[in-house]
Amino acid sequence: MICFGYLNRIHGKFATFVHEIGTISGFESDKGFLTNTFDRLHIMFAAIAFLLILSVQSDSGLQQSANANANTRLPENDPEIEGLLLKLVTQPPDFLVPVNGAANGDTTGDKDGKLKVVAGVVPGLVAAMQQYGKPLRIGAAGVRKWKSEEPIRTGDLVHIGSCTKAMTATMIGRLIDRQKLTFETTIREGLPHLADRIHADYHDVTLRQLLTHRGGVPREAAWHNHADRKITVCRELIVIDALNMKPQKQPDNSFEYSNLGYVIAGLMASHVEGESWEELMKREIFDVLGMHSADFGPPGTNGTDEQPWGHLAFAKGAMPDRFDNPPALGPAGTVHLNMSDWFKFAFEHAGCSEKPIVSTETLQQLHAGPSTNEKENPDTSGEYYACGWMVASRPWAKGR
């Protein structure tokens, strides 16, 4: 699964959020999302083709919320946003995407082994925007599944993939506010019962390093192993298997993306609270923010078009597919929800909430990156990964 998202805070007063059948988020200038030129949107939608690799099936056995919004009045489809999205669905920008194989043996591509995205390869889009003090606007265009006639709707459930990481970090932030953990809590302190079963070089890796991908932890693990065990035990055994040898890369300030790091962070929260990551997410994020559509795994029922499908992108179209990250990877990427609920979470991080769920200090720490002093963050590009967010300056958005 590949997802892309970033948050831009403009004086804490304005945010625009975009979500594909997958995940893409962008935050625009005070002139608004709809008044930007089509060329400007190339920046915001540069990840559309990648997002078609969205996963949509889980073998977790968890209760799904496919019909969570069935009895809820759907937001009206904003005609201006719908019109913009329709243009992007039917006339997408000319992006190039990495080859992931090709349907029916079609490997048409350029000399670099990349495939061009063709018109219509994006089955559907749903987007939302809100200015401070004004109603939320949501638009949708396209279909839930490639070559389906079932339209995508404003209240549909979408899998947000790795944007789950920002929610995991925020849940941990709430525990930090209650002094259950700190950003400097180490793996040895947070998971003392596992310390003797993992290599000593991992003992002093901190929660901050895990949440900012600087813990020297492997990117992936054997996620399908121990699936017969209860979910928290399953994750612990996977971590033991992955960390029982000397790390190839020592923990420091160098960036190394790691889904495993977020699973370890989730386990630290589970240990201190005595609940699974799923239970903590429901209690600390979904219930607190009233995100009633949020749940885990793929949205919808297999074999139906009642919710958006995931897709693989190829040279001449998109292949619908229903697969998901394994349940063990949960803290790194298994949440689904609708746009209205996704926006509730986004507004917390845009600083627009009237009743914030984390303290101002913790929110700053979640956006701070590997160092609490922004000038010490090592990325020379001016961009860095904070706790579930990419932090970057965007001149066209007039903010960071």
Image: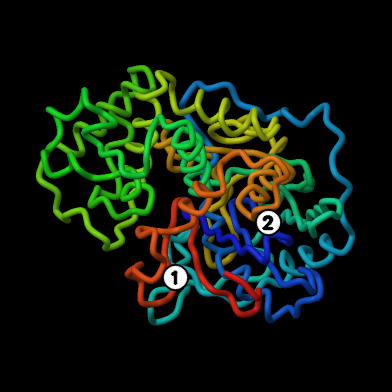
Identify the amino acid type marked 1: Glu
Element assignment for label 2: loop
Q: Name the kind of residue labelled 2 in the image.
A: Pro
Residue 41 lies in what quarter of the image? bottom right
- Percent coordinates x, y for residue 151 in the rendering: 79, 48
Q: Which residue in the protein does label 1 denote?
A: 383
Residue neighbourhood size for the residue with mark 1, other residues' Cα within 10 Å, grouped as few (<14), some (14–19), many (≥20):
some
Determine crowd level at label 2: few under 14, some 14-19, many 20+ residues with C-alpha closer than 10 A: many
Instruction: Give the residue displayed 72% in from the left and 28% down from the top.
Output: 68
Closest to the observer: 191 or 91? 191
Give how far across and how far down residue 104 sits, in percent. 49, 58
- Where does residue 374 sit, x and y in percent of width and height? 41, 66
Q: Mark 2 points at which residue?
A: 123
Image depth: mark 2 or mark 1 in front: 1
* Residue 86 locus on image (x, y percent): 79, 64
Relative to 116, residue 239 above or below: above
Q: Residue at point 36% right, 38% down? A: 265
Q: In this view, does 6 lie above or below 347?
A: below
Residue 216 left/right relative to 232: left
Q: Which of marks 2 and 1 is nearer the N terminus?
A: 2
Residue visible at 87% across and 64% down in the picture: 80
Q: Is residue 149 visible?
A: no
Please indicate, yes or no, whether residue 141 appears anywhere in the rendered image.
yes
Q: What quarter of the picture does the C terminus occupy?
A: bottom right
Q: Quadrant of residue 12?
A: bottom right
The answer to which quarter of the image holds residue 39 is: bottom right
Q: Is mark 1 on a helix, strand or loop?
A: loop
User: Tag count in the figure?
Assistant: 2
